[in-house]
Every structure is written in structure tokens, then in C-alpha cells.
Amino acid sequence: MPIAFEFYAIAGRDKEVRQFLKEYYQQYCRELARLIQRGIERDEFRVVDAEATATTLAALYEGLALLFFVDPQAPRWPEQAETSVLLLLEGLEQRSPS
């Protein structure tokens, strides 16, 4: 984890490293968006902006990683990660009309 955050710090000062990270996250989010779009097409997820939702999911994981790095002894990290993802997925879930 410390190496990952050092990489981010370098990206703040180095245009080439920043470009590498940008391309990495763009690819990562494209793949997530593709999966989300597939869920929408199969009526598993409600209609949402798949790209924005993918960015939200990536940010959720990055944020949790940062918090874990700051306080790895905090209780319940695995449960927190699961709860966070479940909240997002439940928000995406297609609901039958009432």
C-alpha cells in the first residue's frame, strides 16, 4: 500500500506517471462500465449512467484503500468494504414496479 501511495505522489509531480495512471483508470472504468451496462441490458440493474457508476465504484474502492492505509487497525475493514459495495449494488438493482 505505501508503494501505491508513493506512486500517486509521484503522479502529482510527473506528467508521464500521471498519464499512465489516467490510462489505467480509464481502462479500469471502461471495463466496469461494460459490466454495469450488461446488467442494465439484462434488467438486473436499473437504467443509470454506466460510466458515472463505474467511476463511483472505482472511487469507492480507492477511498476505502486510502482509509485502510491511514488506519489499518480500524475494526471491520472487510465488513465495511462489503457493506459499501452492497449499498451501491442495491442502489443499482432493478426494482419491479409497485
Image (cartoon, rainbow, N blue to C red):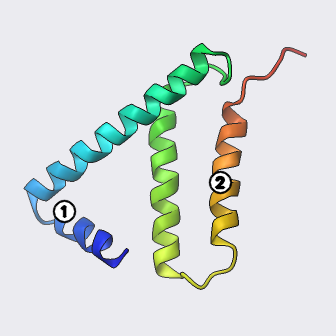
The answer to whether residue 74 is left or right of residue 15 is: right
From what the image shows, is residue 66 above or below residue 56? below
For the residue pair 3 and 46, the one nearer the viewer reads as 3
In the image, what residue type sits under mark 1?
Ala
Q: How many marks?
A: 2
Pointer 1 or 2: first along the chain: 1
Seen at 45% across and 30% down, the residue is 33
Give the position of the N terminus as an image quadrant: bottom left
Of all residues, the one furthest to the right in this rendering is: 98
Element on which disc 1 rests: helix
Local SS, label 2: helix
Kindly identify the residue that appears in the image at 71 percent across and 29 percent down.
Answer: 93
Q: Quadrant of residue 90?
A: top right
The relative height of residue 73 versus residue 79 in the rendered view (above or below) is below
Q: Which residue is mark 2?
A: 84
Residue 81 x, y percent position in the rendering: 62, 60
* Crowd around label 2: few <14 · some 14–19 · many ≥20 (10 Å): some
Left or right relative to 3: residue 12:
left
Dot 1 crowding, Cα within 10 Å, few <14, some 14–19, many 20+: some
Give how far across and how far down residue 61 sits, in percent.
50, 56
Q: Quadrant of residue 3?
A: bottom left
Q: Which residue is mark 1?
A: 11
